[in-house]
Image (cartoon, grey):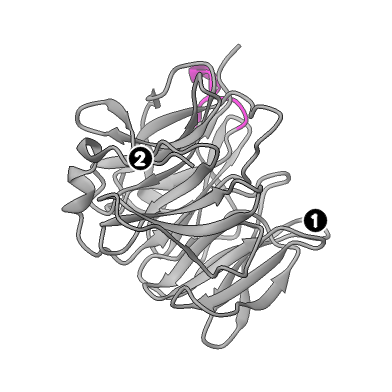
Amino acid sequence: MTRSIVHACCGAVLLAGAAGLVAAQPGVPRTSPPAPSSEIFLVPLTGKGAALAAGAPRNITNRDGYDNQPAFSHDGRALFYTSTRDDAQADIYRFDVAGSRSVRVTRTAPESEYSAFPTPDGYALTVIRVERDSTQRLWRVPLDGSTEQPLFPETKPVGYFAQPTDSTWVLFVLGTPITLHYGAKGTGPTEVVARNIGRSLHRIPGTSLVSVVQKGTPPWQLMAFNPVARTFTALVPLPPGSEDVAWTDGRTVLVGSGSKLLRWSRGDRGWTELADYTGSGLRNITRLAVSPDGSLLAIVADPAK
């Protein structure tokens, strides 16, 4: 296997500090056929709750090919994402928000990396790695090129993940049915705590709870999982066909529905339209990520034809 870490891209991350929020919106890795084309857009956010407003989207990838699974650095100055380029290799790239430039972070073959998110100390990335034998596990990849290691080596195939705390994880594990696993410190066995769940796992800001999408009989439900008590609390039914969410703070969550962006805050009866991006050419909004200070939203959508 050939591996390299592009050091020049990592300065802002190394200075990021230990912010509390760790959440990822990975896409289930695909090795074949090639992943469909998708774009990442940045949208400015202002206000909170009922006063939240979303601005005009800016396409930051703007190319044919797969660009997906965005996650902000802890200081909000960079956005990590998965990109498949001419070499058909899925690797992690880093977009500098101020400089509007992307650089490659990983270069591995034949392995692929997906769903990068910086560790709490900012010195490494946690990724889903598709290994040489197609095994999918959660890995810690240091940004200085030092030893990489799988987390929870026996838990596979992992597709998505989030961290309720700095030392605990919840993992979406593929299978029939799909299961939600909980584990601590990245070693030893993991515990199955739910079944038939969706791909969008997020730590709820300011808490040690994780939001989970419970599938089954429609409508799908957004739930809050308490890892300590091993309990789930229903929050709000999701719009039909939508399953990717992102929290702007501990009270307000966003979801895409077609070309529209919807908002729900605790205490609301249902979803409220925040923005309609039909005129901007955004179709089929899926994965979302909010910067730690709540000022930027990353949106994955199909490009206009």
Q: Which residues are magenta?
A: 276-284
Q: Nearer the viewer, mark 1 or mark 2?
A: 2
- The one nearer the camera, 31 or 248, is 31
Q: Position of residue 46 (x, y in %)?
A: 30, 43
Kindly identify the residue that appears in the image at 53 percent across and 50 percent down: 129
Kindly identify the residue that appears in the image at 20 percent across and 60 percent down: 17
Q: List the residue tagged with mark 2.
A: 4
Helix, strand or loop under label 1: loop
- Please, which residue is most extreme toward the top here? 305
For the C terminus, which image quadrant?
Answer: top right
In the rendered view, tell whether residue 154 sits above or below residue 178: below
Numbered label attached to residue 218: 1
Kindly identify the residue that appears in the image at 35 percent across and 40 percent down: 4
Label 2 crowd bin: few (<14), some (14–19), many (20+), radius 10 Å = few
Q: Position of residue 267 (x, y in %)?
A: 51, 66
- The one nearer the camera, 166 or 125, is 125
Q: Position of residue 42 (x, y in %)?
A: 37, 32
Kindly identify the residue that appears in the image at 42 percent across and 29 percent down: 41
Helix, strand or loop under label 2: loop
Left/right of residue 132 with respect to residue 251 in the rendered view: right
Left/right of residue 126 with respect to residue 180 in the rendered view: left
Q: Position of residue 195 (x, y in %)?
A: 74, 69
Q: Whole-Å distance between the Cαs marked 1 and 2?
A: 44 Å
